[in-house]
Amino acid sequence: MDEPFLGTFAVSEIESAVDVDAILFGVPFEDNIPFYPTGCSSAPQQIRTVSNLFSGQGLRQENIHTRNFLDFGDIDTKDKTYEQIVESVKNRVKQILDKKAIPLILGGDHSIALGTAQGFLEKHPDKKKIVWIDAHLDLMDKYPPGQKKTRATVLRRILELEHIRPEDVYFIGSRGYNLGIEEVEFLKKHTMHLLQSQDFENKKTVNDFLKKMLAEKVPLYVSLDLDVLDPSYAPGVSVPEPAGLTPRELSFILQKLANSISCFEIVELNPLRDYNDFTAMVVCRTIFSLAENLEKKENKV
Ligand SMILES: [Mn+2]
């Protein structure tokens, strides 16, 4: 790691860390599927580089410099199998949750979420919710045909884990014409919660959805796939989908969730598809805004 994410301290171990708000780490991994453009694995490094173009100071006094955020570097993904990477992500997530800090995972493609989910669910076997902020459902059983462990199937694999039911999942920003009939049928068959991209036309629909999701104060695992944003704001993704959210709509959502977030990942930045680092800047903004919106620890779930 050349430079840590702006406003964080680089650390090589976290055992000795005390009173930490969040611990960031990268997962430079992408699956090997020919029709997805390559590039995701360079995202963690690009996010750190771009973060240093900012001051980190917003309009409020609290900011990433006044919080205790650490940067734990990247997971070693070189010559590792998908299963080994999932295992490392899981262990690191658990280690960070043990510190009562928020694991802040920078992908990589969305398939790494299987590791995040395993770590989160082992630590929160009881009440919890998964918030899947993504243009897509990622609920295919096998996609591409025959392949069970990809970015298109990852939420389906997560739902096969222990301690999680379809009704614990909240989708935000789903849309588009890149879905499979099988995943749409899966969604319809189960009681999953869905806030589509087009629902953002109506503020009441959005607020009612958030209200329902936050009615019970339980830990949230928020998985943010950057393709939830409109490609005009976030071109640097592997599977862009028109008619998406604006960065302001995303900020609004995350601001509401900030104090319930137990685990947060940002995936699918593809620097090779980005334009002037616009998408990487949205990632930085999201992290700065999380830092700004966190309440004091004692008020947290
Ligand atoms: Mn996804």
Image (cartoon, rainbow, N blue to C red):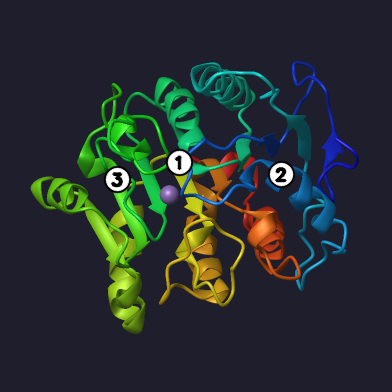
Position above or below: 106 against 252: above
Q: Is residue 181 left or right of residue 156?
A: left
- Callouts 3 and 2 close, C-beta under 8 Å: no
Mark 2: which amino acid? Ser
Q: Residue at x 69, y 56 (%)?
A: 271
In the rendered structure, which disc, 3 or 2, sits on the residue that comes first in sequence? 2
Closer to the camera in the image, 259 or 109: 109
Report the residue marked by disc 3.
169
Q: Is mark 2 within 8 Å of ligand 1?
A: no
Q: Residues within 10 Å of mark 2 (few under 14, many from 20)?
A: many
Which residue is the extreme one toward the right?
2
Left or right, 126 with reference to 48: left
Residue 62, image x, y percentages: 76, 59
Type of the residue with mark 3: Val
- Residue 104 screen position, x and y as percent: 63, 40
Q: Which mark is residue 42?
A: 2
Residue picked out by circle 1: 221
Distance from Cα at disc 2 to Cα at disc 1: 24 Å
In this rendering, is residue 109 above or below 247?
above
Front-lying residue, 84 or 35: 35
